[in-house]
Amino acid sequence: MKILLSAIACNPYWGSEASIGWKVAKCIARHHEVWVLTSEDNRENMTKGIQEGLVPENMHVHYCGKEAVACHPNRMIARLKSWTQYLDFSRSILPAAMELHRQVGFDLVHHVTYATWRVPIKLWKMPVPFVWGPLGGNERFPLNFMPMLSPATMAFEFARYAANAVGTISRNVRQCARNSTFILASNADAWDKLHSLRGNDKGLHRLLVTFFTPAELAKLNIEDNPKPFDGTLKLFCSGNLEGRKGVALAIRGLAIAKKQGVKFSYRIGSQGPESDYLRRLVKELGLEQDVVFGEQLPREGYVEELKKTHVYLLPSLRDNAPSTLMEAMLAGCVPIVAECGGPAEIVNADCGFPIPVKTPDQIVSGVAEALTQLYKEPERIAVMGRNARERIRNHYCEDYYWSVLSGVYDEALKLSSVGSLS
């Protein structure tokens, strides 16, 4: 089968969404011939990947849109520039795809990155089945938690609420949702939004945006490396330190746990806009000896850190499918998360502690309670860590991802063969 994959972010050397686009392209290429339409930003690295033998022979890469300008240090401005680039890509992709279709004759078109429902992709106008997603982006930061954010971060979250409202009433977004052959929703929040936009659940499927390749599963394998407990819980978190990540709530929970006799070491392996505030909070609560701030670890160091960590503590209040959380679970860490967005579906009570999101105080007390339970019953660390590892292996591996995706492709082709496309 000949498949056209639209992925503005697709790069064999980068992380985040670029990694997702690359893994999906590689996954499809193991089964079909694939043409990838991606951003000009990726040309240099894709060319390098071809030279180094990373790009398979049945993967053909084409470029579309404008090359992005240098990243701005202000997060809000950087995000706006990223969206501007994506809007340009979304407008230019249909003519480029139609020209390729005239040359190749595709059986199916699939769009994967960026994984948001807010920007419509006009590839549904092509005369072949169109699969849109997996999509997220409908996760909402709880309004009653807004006062805990800095003014800049609060402004960003309100801007995101506004963007969601505009997307909901957009004629182009609704057209894309109703005319796509199939839409893949990454989580329950996205499902609700896409169901509303589409008008029904026909052709609406669930599939998390993140998955792990066999090589990634092997890299984080710790079955033969049990984690000893010497009386101190080893905690870790990573990712850009923004207010929505809930690290301040986690630190306040640690202060309560310490008063209850829990011994721990919490390593924050990243930096971000909230770094200075979090350092002040740690000092204010007398946790300087218990909380360690560090620079972002290189990949090998990061993997080794996860392999000796008992608990991954990051009660993020707005996330789709956080790869750092899933990597930690794959490494046998027990996750403590806020029960919202993607983490609410990834983490269950068998493998971690999903804390209900009602008030900030509830999150704080929930963190303290979870740590106290693990400290008093350390044997649970191995059991829950094993369950966490198996949950990722079984539900978020490449084989599972492809089993769902190939089923969607088959259904899309059947609809096309009987002339049932919109």
Image: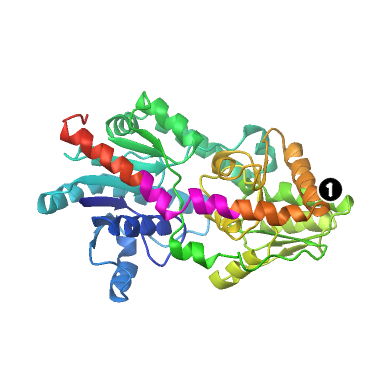
Which one is nearer the viewer's eye here, 108 or 111?
A: 108
Q: Position of residue 27 (x, y in %)?
A: 34, 57
| Front position in the image: 52 or 330 | 330
Callout 1 crowding tier (Cα within 10 Å): few <14, some 14–19, many ≥20: some
Query: Which type of secondary structure does the marked residue at label 1 adopt?
Result: helix
> Total number of numbered labels?
1
Q: Position of residue 291 (x, y in %)?
A: 76, 61
> Viewed as shown, does residue 47 lie left or right of 276?
left
Query: What are the residue bounds of the magenta stretch?
Result: 389-404
| 86 up-or-down from 73: above or below | above
Q: Residue at x 22, y 33 (%)?
A: 415
* Residue 334 seen in the current view: no
As drawn, the residue found furthest toward the left would be 102
Q: Residue furthest top?
A: 199
237, above or below 174, in the image: below
Residue 137, given in percent of the width and then of the height, sits at: 47, 40
Residue 289 location, quadrant: bottom right
Q: Main secondary structure of the magenta part?
A: helix
Q: Nearer the viewer, residue 173 or 236?
A: 236
Residue position for label 1: 256
Q: Please, is residue 368 above or below residue 124 in the view? A: below
Where residue 355 sits in the image (x, y, percent)?
A: 69, 40
Residue type marked 1: Ile
Q: State whether residue 79 appears in this view.
A: yes
Residue at 28%, 43% (x, y): give it. Answer: 409
Q: Is residue 390 magenta?
A: yes
Tell me what residue is drawn at x 36 percent, y 30 percent.
Answer: 170
